[in-house]
Image: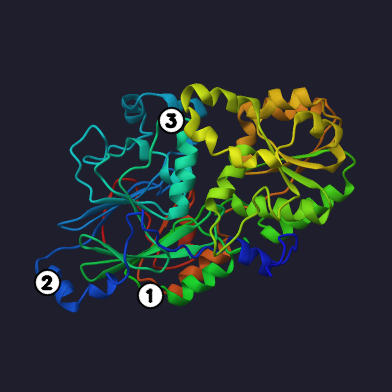
Amino acid sequence: MSKAVGAASTADARRLVFPVLQPTGSRRLLQAGFLEACTKKQIFRTERQGCRMELIIYRGTHEIGGTMIELKTRGTRILLDAGYPLYYKGEIIDESWVKKPAKELLELGVIPQVKGLYQWDQPKFDAVILSHAHSDHYGLLKYIHPKIPVYLTEAAETLISLSLSFPIPKFRMENTMIFYMEKPFQIGDFFLKPYLMDHSAFDAAAFEIRAEGKTLIYSADFRNHGWKGYCLENFLQKAPKYADLLLVEGTNIGRKSESLPSESDVQQKVEAILKDSEGIVLFQASTQNVDRMISFYQAAEAQGKFLVVDVYVANLLSQLTRPNYRLPVPGGRYRAMKVFYPFPLGRLWQTKGREILCSFLPFIRSRISMRKISKKQKCIVMMVRPSMLSDLKKIELDPGDFIYSMWQAYRGKGSQVRFEKYLSSLGFQSHLAHTSGHASEAAIKQVIAELHPKRVIPIHTFHPEAFFAFSDKTEVFQDSWVIKV
């Protein structure tokens, strides 16, 4: 018999979120064994022809978010991630800019100038490979030429499809190829092997990449203080040592004021807040941070409270669940989870029709009304976001507690400021219970020390120069420079 989700141990969380995705007949799937086909004869031939792998970081040498990296040989071009930026000229990017026309975004530099990548060009890339489903790594996907295949995990495809289907009418993920962790695959001259990493995005991958006798390792985004922290040890054990180049993220470098508690610490803090609260507890977290959903569910169940999520989150968790691993999904054994149907979802009838909304029907039996939430406030832990403000006003909330569980920089956005100001006016006490989805300085140093790369290039950081203190192999470049591997 499976153990209930309510236990707060790391071992239980490991069983909850460690995916071992299996092929299904309806997908275009990548088969194992390609890396082994990269024979010495092939490598010798490309080296004799004078080929050499080249690297171009279009965004990320001195910036967090919006990652775009090209790798190319004489015969193959691939793009690692296609991210929408988090910043513009050092400030958090205006969220309304996503609606600007592509021509204007190109002029602003939000969309980097890359020939042969976008819908308006002749396609010259062989593939786009996505490390995980965060918009600063996939947010430019809608501009990519549809003939260029997109390689990603099955879970990432699900997350991205759900995220983009709402703001982009009739959006569909097309021309996708599904890869599996530690199953090598080939794209032209490149041989890639993905590794599951601990990150705030579900099913995040790092990559070992080989071509023309060279080996490159791309860490993408990672950490070792989440529920899947053991993934880093697995990666360090299996990834090749003495690679020619290591691309390693440095998001948290320079953030001296930001602490990095473990995900278990976050759950314990949430439990303490729930225990002391005398009213409803509202919390705000990323809808795609599955680890955080688990933390709040386990904390709520431990304190004998109901966890209320909206139907979008319920559907997301349901679609990510597979027979060989489980997530808390409303209904069945997870009776402590209830589903709320926010008013804005009604507008989807005009833009999405029945296809999207029919996927919400399975949660009708777990539905909780505004009236019941209003009556049972002391028993409720409810996930909220600024777009639900009109619904919260109808609930007639009594004073309670609000837990912010996201990156602090988002709190400066206008909609967020208005949302928290309203809760404060009702007498809500505000709390912060969060940890970063990115590596600590110690974890970054551990990766460099244990992999022994010949060269280290920092990415996804505002402080690449700090890496000179981590390794004498460090090299710092500018965006769009051509780097010989």
In the rendered structure, which disc, 2 or 1, sits on the residue that comes first in sequence? 2
Q: Quadrant of the N terminus?
A: bottom right
Q: Position of residue 406 (x, y in %)?
A: 64, 44
SS for dot 3: loop
Q: Position of residue 416 (x, y in %)?
A: 65, 30
Q: Check disc 1 and report the residue beneath it.
A: 240
Query: Horizontal and vertical percent for residue 317?
Result: 58, 49
Task: Quote the CA–CA distance across marks 2 and 1.
Answer: 22 Å
Q: What residue do we see at 50% from left, 34% from top? A: 356
* Mark toward the viewer: 3 or 2: 3
Q: Is residue 272 visible?
A: yes
Q: Earlier in the sequence, mark 1 or mark 3?
A: 3
Locate residue 90 relative to residue 178 in the image: left or right. right
The residue under label 1 is which amino acid type? Answer: Pro
Q: Name the amino acid, label 2.
A: Arg
Please indicate, yes or no, whether residue 65 appears anywhere in the rendered image.
no
Alpha carbon distance from label 3 to label 2:
46 Å
Q: Which residue is identified by label 2?
A: 45
Q: Is residue 60 above or below residue 93?
A: below
Q: Secondary structure at mark 1?
A: loop
Where residue 53 sits, quadrant-wise, is: bottom left
The secondary element bearing badge 2 is classed as helix
Neighbor class of circle 2 (other Cα within 10 Å; few <14, some 14-19, many 20+) is few
| Residue 168 marker | 3
